[in-house]
Amino acid sequence: MSASVAQTTVDSLRALPGDAVRQVLWRFSSRFDLAMLVQSVRAVARGPVARLVAQGARLTHEWTPEKNELLREFDHSGITAAYMDPEAGGYLEGPKNLALALIAFELAWVDAGAATGSLAGCLALSPIHERGTPEQRSRYMALAAPGGPDEPKRGSFALTEPIPFAGVETGLLSGKVRIAEWPDGGEPLLEVSKRGRFITNMGFANFVTAAVDSDDPRIQGSLMVILEETDPGIFDRGTPTRKLVHQLSSTSDPVFQLKVPASRIVGGYRVENGVILPRYSHGEIIEAVFRRTRVTVALMTSAKLLSAVEPLIRYHRDRFRGSGAVSPGSPRFELGLQQKEDVVHRLLDIWATGEASASLGFQAARLFDELDPIEKRKDEVLEAAGVSGSMAAFKFLKRKQGDAIAALKTGAGDPVLQYLILDAQANVHCPACKLWNTGHGANTMREAVSLMGGYGITEDCPGFLGYKWMDAQLEATYEGPEAVQRRQLTVTMTNEIFLEQFRLWIGEMRKIASRRPGAGACTLASAMELWLWTLNYLQRIKLFQGSRQAVTFPLADALCWLLASRAQILDVEELREKGPDNPGAAEGLEATVQFLTDLCHIQAARAAGEVNRVCSELVFGHRAHPSWEGAGHSCYQEEELIGIESVVPGASGFTSDFVYEDGRVPDKAGPCVDMSGLADFNRLSTKVHGCMSGFMIAKNRAAQALQKVMIPAALDYPA
Amino acid sequence: MSYQIVVCGGIAPDPLQTLEPVPGPALKNEMMLPHVFDPWAAHALYEAGHLAKLNPGAKVWVVSMAPKAKLQQVMMTVAQKLPFELVPLDGPPGGFTDSADVAEALAAAIRTIAGLDLSRLLLFGGWESATRGAGTTMQRVGALLGITEQFLAVDQLEVRDGGSLRVWERLEGGRQQVSLCSGLPAMLAWATGHLPEPPNHPPTGMANGRLLMPALQKAKPAPAGAGCTFLDVSLPKQIRQTVIVKDKPAAEIAREIVEWITQ
Ligand SMILES: Cc1cc2nc3c(=O)[nH]c(=O)nc-3n(C[C@H](O)[C@H](O)[C@H](O)COP(=O)(O)OP(=O)(O)OC[C@H]3O[C@@H](n4cnc5c(N)ncnc54)[C@H](O)[C@@H]3O)c2cc1C
């Protein structure tokens, strides 16, 4: 890379992508309600939240009055009510997944603890919103809605329990429910005992949705129940968790021993033969809840990565300014550390990861916005067909699988088929973004901290990068650690409806590549083919099984790389297509698109490399390495070769390794591996290598752009 | 009394941006920089909102000339603060457009507002803009609309019984001139006023947004600035020294600034 600051005539990225560009990329340019929400949340994030962090509010585990003040900021700025429907005191129409994703993104741009605090309230309400009875919905939504004369009521979601109970394994519940009283013909009164561990918002929550198991033959199975602080019994908030991260959220280990009416069972119940049958088990409820809320967590880490770009550029550029020895105008003065190739290239990796993860997360959020109304329509169809109960619904939908796959080609009008198609996607995209954005994101945040030198691990680091690095680890852990997401992907990524779509996406990438060769789409398509081949192969040889996590998990990881890169490419294609018609995004568009395309190329190449590595490890790693003798013996003996030669002269030249008659082996590295049956793999893998062509050229071009891009004089929030 | 308040205000680049004049004249990458509502006009707007809130039936219009795509982005924040109707003019951004041209375009736009009674108008704006700083636009708009009661650098307005106005204007040396104005129409070009920025109120934003977006889509081009040619533009000879501090009391900051100026 050139160290000079000379102007080039090629138009290069002029400024960091602004709101208008983001709105096009993440597909909300026609949603002024969301554009307003973003501004509103941003004012809170870069105002009171940033000031709190800068003042050291993260240095205590306690829930202080200053932290508590944030709740009011959330109420006033519309963050609290964004989750609610207009009839329940909200102001946003329709599904809210993208809205909540944008809130999480904006808050986590500065501090993800603040994001967690705001979203944990939604998490508490989610079981009620998704599965509650109409009465439960109207009561708790109204209580939680700000704007009334009283302070809104706030909630917590309590699933996790002290060791050795519920954690990753959510079925191991020690929380219990039994019947305290059951008056004749009246409503049963339940006795709930539950200890929670790491429960967010517990420092101030007024109600809790808690997962418990039956400890009474008159209650069937597990359930979720709503507890209120005024219920008779013990509502002990517990001591604050001594956590190292997300200090602007409140976390503690509470203890509940309360009597509550059975009407608090989330989703209601019926009584059969004197036994309470809850409508939903706790498992069914958390399934419905987490599949939405995990997307917002994923975006918290994306925001961190993208928020690191500006402070890093500034740090690098300004690094040597102010010293008398470095004169203005000199490359060292103007570019500082950006003169060094490694610095800019690593920042590009961080930026590309941030773009891909944001694209994947927002894609998932939009997918749920699309899915929500279709899911309701599907429920109506099922109800009209007289299908009730989760087992019957499962069987009904299972029978439609083939039709759904056929409809992928013809375009489905039927809501049930549409539902199956989108649901198959959502079931992959949700764990994929939670897993990859946070897990790989946390690793990448470490790189960002590293690029800030010693400053990176101080409280004074502009952009709070050190805090963000640690925070990312929590995002990878709560609401289901990586293992949970990988386990879910193991199942959902092999759903034939998903795989059929995946095959179509390979074609989609090839089409993009034919319009725009050398931009990463082809690289990605080749890697997608390799992944698909590997999955089929591992299934065929029965290595792909739930219990073999060392096979299924890496393959799930590899898929995430592919999906993130695809989402990123699709977003940039959207910008290329729609940007010119959007006056806010149009200025400097060509250069912005070129730069973002280069980031796609960088990311696609990384993804392809990662997929190639994982697939090669899995395909070859389980084949015994050949040896000169013994179990892995796969070599000819010298006398065998002489025999072959006597029948077909010259044929021995086509055989592989052999052992001499006296037992000597050729003086080389070792016997070569047996590739039989893997010709396709090798072809696809080699193709992936070839498809990497040009990616370093793209990276060098992007590196030059990084040296020239204009950034603001100072960060727009304190540090 | 149901007031009709028209607030004129443009947009300005976010103050954290590096601004560099380029031939045109324009600011380098101006359309790509984040913008804010002009701070002086914003004070006028908050005062207008406050007055309207105290006087049921009152209505606020915001007349703004700016590239409409940028104006739309700025409105995503401003429109959440108080109820108003936007009258957008799709024109050049602030800094290099002659104030006479701007005033003409604004006055013409105000005349087109349906149902507006010019004889009862309260015309608000900033005493100058953060981009041009000419300090002459509002007087011209007032004059073009035939409003002769004009107040400049207003810090405070009191509406008295009977509809007369008491107005505090900022003078040199921290003093104020207090005037009594017997009635409307009047033009008030505000200095800082005394109201804080209202917090965002998303439901207000949603309500404003329903009218705002169609208005922006229909915004007419305002070819202002044609009558003025700039021979040369350059940055003022000024040293910018940005110091990032935290936890410093205001008195201490003030002392340091005085020390720096008197150095
Ligand atoms: C700050 C914070 C806030 C939280 N907020 C809440 C809240 O509001 N409500 C709530 O209910 N919970 C909350 N949690 C709890 C959080 O969801 C759990 O910590 C998380 O689900 C993991 O459970 P665990 O800690 O018991 O880990 P474990 O279950 O002990 O798992 C530890 C590790 O073991 C491995 N592992 C475990 N099981 C498997 C498996 N089957 N296959 C493969 N690997 C496996 C994985 O690597 C996993 O990461 C919060 C946690 C924290 C730290």
Image (cartoon, rainbow, N blue to C red):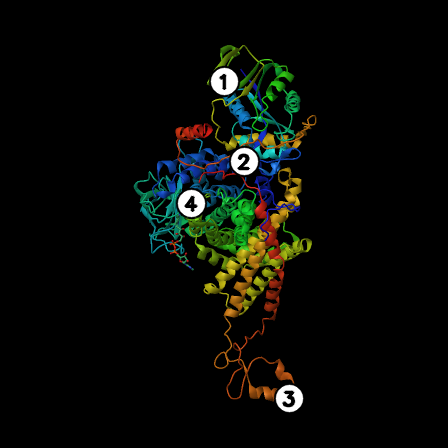
Residue A647 circle label:
3
Q: How far apart are the alpha carbons under marks 2 and 1?
A: 40 Å
Q: Which residue is mark 4?
A: A268
Q: Position of residue A634 (x, y in %)?
A: 53, 80
Percent position of residue A371, x then y: 55, 47
- Asked if the residue under mark 3 is in contact with the one under mark 4, i.e. CB atoms within 8 Å, the reply is no
Among the two numbered marks 2 and 4 on one chain, the one whose residue lies closer to the N terminus? 2
Whether residue A614 is visible here, answered yes or no, is yes
Q: Quadrant of the C terminus of chain A?
A: top left
- Judged from the image, the secondary structure of the residue bearing numbered disc 3 is helix
Residue highlighted by disc 2: A36
Secondary structure at numbered mark 2: helix
Q: In what element is the residue under mark 1? A: helix
Number of the label disc, if any, that sits on residue B172 = 1
Q: Dot 4: few (<14), some (14–19), or many (≥20) neighbours within 10 Å?
A: many
In the displayed structure, would residue A672 be above or below residue A378? below
What kind of residue is marked 1? Glu
Q: Cα distance, mark 1 to mark 3?
A: 113 Å
Left or right side of A241 for A568 = right
The kind of residue tagged 4 is: Gly
For marks 2 and 4, give the one nearer the viewer. Answer: 2
Q: Chain of mark 2?
A: A
Mark toward the viewer: 1 or 3: 1
Q: Where is A574 relative to A496, above or below?
A: above
Residue A622 placement (x, y as % from top left): 50, 70
Of the two numbered discs 2 and 1 in the rendering, the one whose residue sits closer to the viewer: 1
Co-location on one chain, circles 1 and 3 = no
Q: CA distance from mark 2 to mark 4?
A: 37 Å
Give the residue type at disc 2: Met
Q: Position of residue B60 (x, y in %)?
A: 56, 23
Q: Residues within 10 Å of mark 2 (few under 14, many from 20)?
A: many
Dots 1 and 4 on the same chain: no
